[in-house]
Amino acid sequence: MLTDRTVMITGASSGIGAAAARVFAAQGAHVVLMARRAALIEELADELTAGGTRALAVPGDVTSADDVRHVVAEAVRHFGRLDAAFNNAGWGTAGFAVHEVPDAMYDRIMDVNVRGVWNCLRHQIPVMIDQGAGGSIVNTSSTAGRFATGAVAPYVAAKHAVLGLTKAAAADYGEQGIRVNALVVGSTRTPLMEQGKDRREAAGRPSGARAIQRRLARPAEVANAAAWLCSDLASFVTGAEIAVDGGVGAV
């Protein structure tokens, strides 16, 4: 359980991030919602508040260090501390071979998926160190962080990089009691996944086909794994790559 712990969630406007907000709230956490789409996270914060959760919506873009710094500061100002974070914001696509990827697409994928996690780590961790009570951070990677999945090459590279950042941060801050882990997420039924569905199927890569369970994950299934990693039930887990992929990595 996460009773009275303050958790920051990025990419909270829809999909896995919004599901995580609801899962964390159900476990008693105070939630700080960050995403670019202000109206959606404000609506979600209102929903959670009506259910008895202390929720705060702070619009921002993870590619901006200033935005991330502001969200972390607001979390501390409103709730007095930051105990955990789910760095979930991401963006990618499919259907482009390496030589077809435009520079702008490469830059956006790297900025959101890699710089976004980097920005979060470097502003969340100092707060946790100053508090002196440790903390838990979960970064969203992907099966693309382990092998080529049909996503564009920069996305595969970016999600590999998320695993590298996770391991390095875990090693750097383990003695301060800060745990840093990553979720290796398989195909999940999110708006972003739906947007790329036609391209993947046209390329002969139907969504969820690699999973042993032969289906897409529900966002809440991924969120449940993040909540476990943020809780004391995972107190001896750090630097880990936790697969939530329906068995893709097993075959």
Image: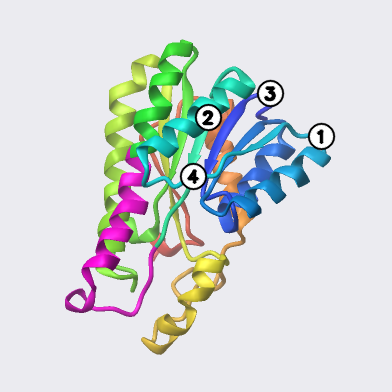
Q: Which mark is residue 4?
A: 3
Can residue 144 be seen from the camera position used here? yes
Quickly name the residue at label 1: 52
Look at the image and tell me whether residue 146 can be seen. no
The residue depicted at 41 percent of the width and 83 percent of the height is 199
Nearer the observer, disc 1 or disc 2?
1
Q: Is residue 86 above or below residue 128?
A: below
Label whose residue precedes the other's in the sequence (1 or 4):
1
Nearer to us in this view, 151 or 126? 126
Q: Main secondary structure of the magenta part?
A: helix
Disc 4 is placed on an element classified as loop
Q: Which residue is mark 4?
A: 60
Looking at the rendered structure, the secondary structure element under dot 2 is: strand
Q: Quadrant of the C terminus?
A: bottom left
From mark 1 to mark 2, how far is it between C-alphas? 20 Å
- Distance from Cα at disc 4 to Cα at disc 3: 24 Å
Which residue has dot 2 on it?
A: 84
Label 4 crowd bin: few (<14), some (14–19), many (20+), radius 10 Å: many
**Label 1 secondary element:** loop
Neighbourhood count class around disc 1 (C-alpha, 10 Å): few under 14, some 14–19, many 20 upward: few
- The magenta stretch spans which residues? 92-118
The first of marks 4 and 2 along the sequence is: 4
